[in-house]
């Protein structure tokens, strides 16, 4: 995984936006003097630089709750998120909190521990069944 936009900005900011300092950090992390761009860094190398600069390393931003708007099972899961109360306010509206959904998919409580977009139809059915049971318990 390549370095994220947030990591690259944090590195540049910690170098006071000076290219020569940034290039030295890139060469140090990659162990290659021919590389000078932040685009040459992996996610872990960028975190290594941030730690060396005294900053906190960034967490992986992989979101397991991302869904396909054209998949009817994904849309139903989105509907179940609203019914369960997995929502957050965005621009004055309630929207499904796909980050919380992703955290639930990663947890022990999820019947299938996989990102939503990588699940097969039968795995999605298991997720839907579990979410329906949670919704039933909530509204009893």
Image: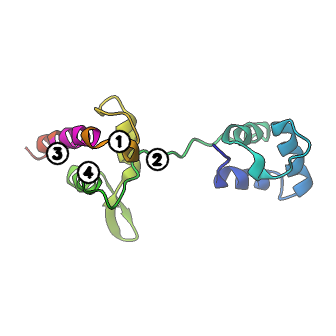
Q: Mark 4 — residue?
A: 77
What coloring was used for the rendering? rainbow
Does residue 86 sit above or below 109 in this rendering? below
* Earlier-in-chain disc, 2 versus 4: 2
* Earlier-in-chain disc, 4 versus 1: 4
Seen as rendered, the residue at the extreme bottom is: 92
Q: Is residue 130 left or right of residue 46?
A: left
Instruction: Residue at 26% x, 51% y: name it.
Output: 77
Which range of residues does the magenta coloring cover?
A: 123-132
Give me the disc on residue 135.
3
Give me the disc on residue 63.
2
The answer to whether the residue labelled 4 contacts the one labelled 1, judged by CB atoms less than 8 Å apart, is no
Q: Is residue 116 magenta?
A: no
* Earlier-in-chain disc, 4 versus 3: 4
Q: Is residue 111 left or right of residue 25?
A: left
Q: Mark 1 — residue?
A: 119
Q: Is residue 29 left or right of residue 108?
A: right
* Earlier-in-chain disc, 2 versus 3: 2
Question: Within 10 angstroms of label 2, few (less than 14), some, or many (20 or more) residues?
Answer: some
Does residue 55 sit above or below 38 in this rendering? above
């Amino acid at each position: 995984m390549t370095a994220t936009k947030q990591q690259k900005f944090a590195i540049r900011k910690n170098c006071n936006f000076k290219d020569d300092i940034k290039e030295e950090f890139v060469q140090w992390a990659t162990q290659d003097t021919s590389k000078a761009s932040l685009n040459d860094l992996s996610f872990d190398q960028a975190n290594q630089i941030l730690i060396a600069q005294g900053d906190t390393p960034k967490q992986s931003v992989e979101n397991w709750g991302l869904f396909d708007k054209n998949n009817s099972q994904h849309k139903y899961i989105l509907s179940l998120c609203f019914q369960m109360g997995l929502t957050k306010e965005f621009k004055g509206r309630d929207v499904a909190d796909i980050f919380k959904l992703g955290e639930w998919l990663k947890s022990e409580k999820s019947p299938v521990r996989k990102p939503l977009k990588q699940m097969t139809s039968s795995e999605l059915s298991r997720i839907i069944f579990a979410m329906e049971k949670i919704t039933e318990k909530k509204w009893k």
